[in-house]
Amino acid sequence: MSLQTTSLSLEDESALAAFAQRLARAASEPLAIALEGPLGAGKTSFARALLGALGHSGPVRSPTYTLVEQYRLSDGIVWHLDLYRLGSAEEVDWLGLDDFDPNSDWLLVEWPQRGAEHLPSLDLTMRLDYADPGRSMQMAAQSERGLVLLREIED
């Protein structure tokens, strides 16, 4: 059950990147974010933009085939998961998330519904969808951290 929701329109990929910058500046602590939406809606593009906003300067690979990619930052790790190819939710248990630290690490999960209850607690659900023009994004807070972030970006 979500605590608060908000939505916005993103005209193009540069608007998506600008929003990722805004989210990174507004976050006072790391977040676990579910990225939902149809194929090609911009989930990986958002993850790439957020990683850049958080200070990662190298390439960002889609974890479609590896299932998980890790990016080291100065103060933690960004875990980027793509669960599209999972055969069952239990396979999440094999991705090494026992090492995930919600106090220092970010978690970005594409296709989170395929991991169900095997994922760590999520702070925010972001749903990207096609819109004319660009994309629409609906966000729902799933924790107190998510609620604080949504309040911050709405101000």
Image: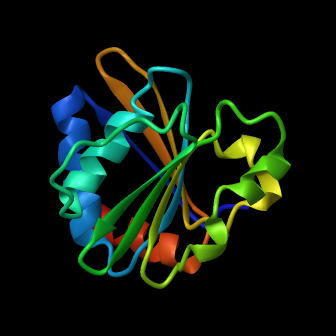
- Please, which residue is most extreme toward the top here? 132
Which of 73/17 is in front? 73
Q: Residue at x 42, y 81 (%)?
A: 104
Q: Position of residue 82 (x, y in %)?
A: 56, 40
Residue 33 vertical placement versus 29 (above, below): above
Q: Residue at x 74, y 41 (%)?
A: 114
Residue 40 vertical placement versus 25 (above, below): above
Which of 83/136 is in front? 83
Name the quadrant containing residue 85: top right
Which of 116/26 is in front? 116
Q: Position of residue 15 (x, y in %)?
A: 20, 37
Which of 86/151 is in front? 86
The C terminus sits in image quarter: bottom left
Count of marks placed on residues: 0
- Residue 26 placement, left or right of 110: left
Q: Position of residue 130 (x, y in %)?
A: 44, 20
Q: Residue at x 73, y 61 (%)?
A: 1
- Residue 118 placement, left or right of 109: right
Name the quadrant containing residue 117: bottom right
- Please, which residue is most extreme toward the bottom here? 103
- Residue 63 placement, left or right of 58: right
Q: Residue at x 23, y 63 (%)?
A: 54
